[in-house]
Amino acid sequence: MKRSIPIFFFLVITVITNSSYAQEVQDAASSHKSYKKGARLFKNGNFVKAEEQFQMLLDSGYRDNDLIAYQAQVHLELHEPHSAKDVILLSPKRDQDLDYLLAISHYYLEEFDDARRELSLVTDTATFHVDEMRRRLEDVAHHYHDAQGYVIQNFGSEVNTKYREYAPVMYDGFKELLFTTRNDSSEYTAHDGLAFEAIHDTSIDSLNQWHVADPFDFHTSHEKRHDATVQVYRNHTKLITFHEGRLFKSHLVDHTWEEDGPLELHDVEATDTHCHIADDESSIIFASDFQSFGHDLDLFVSYKQEDNTWSEPEALTELNTDFDEDSPFLAGDSTLYFSSRGHNSLGGYDVFKTTYDSKKKKWRKPINLDYPINTVSEDIYFSTYGKVGFISSTRVGGYGSLDLYRILLFNEIMINGTVVDEQTKDPIPNAQIEIVYDSLYFRTYTDKDGKYEMFVPVNKNMKITVLDGKKKVSQGEYFLDVFFREQDNLAFDFEIPSAGAVTPPTSGAQLIHVEMKNDFEEKPYIKSIAKDEISSWSDSLKNYYEQVRIANAPPGPGMVTVYLEFNSSDLSPSVKNVLNELYEDLLKDGKYKVEISGHTDPRGSQSYNQRLSLRRANVVGEFLFGHGLKKDKAKVVGYGETKLIDPSDSEEAHAKNRRVEIRYF
């Protein structure tokens, strides 16, 4: 069968093998036949049935620590850390075994402070991997803090269930999806208590919604054996699948998949779990345990020979570790992705990438893809096609165990359009567009023709307000979704009701539909803004001019505003970019006088806010002076909380108020 994904790698040794659990039949709970049967099932790897036996005892009122430890481990093996934590908290008096299991449960729930607290109670470092766990807790703070700006989308309840869905394979222009599931659609179960692996199929509609998944019409599928997805290639006419430890090739004949037989990659009895075969079938990279005699998976490469057989497999020694490597995927830009339990992964499997050095004839050192692609949970079966990726993960927030996710490798996209009168279709010049989401605030302005450009977040609910002067002319909830098509179309027009017009209320957010070609090319209109930068990020000066865009504006006074973090005067890279543009475009020739004024929100004392506002203004001033702005041309002042843009007590108002204004005149 296909390799299971145990959650205890590195961090846990089976607690029930400790001396405290080696004693036979300690009390009524442990002498109960359900306890003995559950322990036997646990030892044999049937965690589903073991959970049922232990739960019967718990439901009857037993609170024995041995029983609770067993059940907690069962839930962790089934990727259910919430349930593991809940059952541990049933114990009236925890011991070190339960403290350690609770620390691990918190870890997989991404409750890292709680995990540290529980781990501090475990003093038995000979029995438990305390030092290893501490190292991971230190590492995870770094990985999670430097989160990449990606959008992670669960495939939803039409695809994912409380069981296991994994190994996504996209084809037909990303409209069709094959994947592996171990749901309850089959009455037959494998030795681990879960249903046999089966391949399911689904498709996406014009609204980016996935249809209910159905069993894949596959010639070789069988209810009492494992059938799993691996790869579709050769223009969707050839298919690689997994069957009972071997990789099989099939081809499409009259809309039916016909099996060609197994890939004869070696002459040793072993398990080959996954592969990526070149489109012309000249080479194959695959995962197998044939050199470790069933202990660990490694990556190998073989080449097609003149007699149509595969060459002797070569181990990818630069990538293999003492632990499992699996699910290789060679992307269109020649980057190799794979999952590994080694290379200092965050949890179990993490996704890594590497490229081949043709001069040295070896693979470069693998790079961890980091959070949010990798989490402390299991992250495996990653594939990527240009700007979008796919992964299977047990991460927090899913439907249960392994779920399928789509990854957009960006989180901000520039849209453009015109603000027009809904009835006359006349453009509205010099209109202000405000965007608020996640307590963040941005704005931009239309030019003399009513046109605008602005970066907006993907897959976020936004409140967008349009003002004509001081008058609010439109406000609504919006949600931007990206559709991958053959060409780019990022246009969206805001239609403003005419004065006096009555508009019916809308329910829910209005969809901003943008289309984008999916490829590996860099594009200036999509951005990946890291988590720790997004609150002070801006795309360009276009967001901050309080008049028409400079390219179309006559000479005259104006103002640029940059926004800072709460209680901070630090300038993010994006704010520095804004100030760079301001200096180069307007202030470099010295024709303007400048006032740099710092402001705060009303939280904190007036005296502290006064000092903070001046500190903010000084930081911006020193940045511009360092670029060449003459000090005799500038005035630097702090106004504290005396000039609030929005006096209301809301996160949106606070985000608007903590700012530095650079006026030029």
Image (cartoon, rainbow, N blue to C red):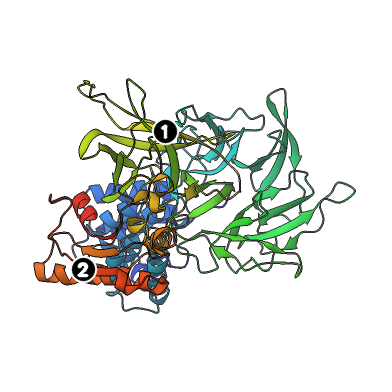
Q: State which tag comes first along the sequence, 1 or 2.
A: 1
Work out which quarter of the rendered image holds the C terminus and state it. Answer: bottom left
Which label was assigned to residue 492? Answer: 1
Name the residue that disc number 2 marks.
637
Residue closer to the observer: 41 or 138:
138
Q: Helix or strand or loop: what does disc 1 sit on?
A: loop
Task: Please state which of residues 320 and 138 is positioned toward the viewer in this rendering.
Answer: 138
| Three-letter code for the amino acid on which mark 1 is drawn | Phe
Q: What is the tally of numbered marks visible in this picture? A: 2
Indicate whether 450 appears above or below 147. above
- Residue 408 in percent (x, y) is at 48, 46
Q: Residues within 10 Å of mark 2 (few under 14, many from 20)?
A: many
Q: Which mark is residue 178?
A: none
Residue 390: x, y in percent? 53, 46
| Cα–Cα span, label 1 and label 2 | 40 Å
Kindly identify the residue that appears in the image at 67 percent across and 50 percent down.
275
Q: Report the side of 485 relative to 17 (left or right).
A: right
Judged by depth in the image, the label closer to the viewer, 1 or 2, is 2
Q: Amino acid at mark 2?
A: Val
**With 490 as the anchor, is 607 left or right in this view?**
left
In the figure, 10 relative to 245: above or below?
below
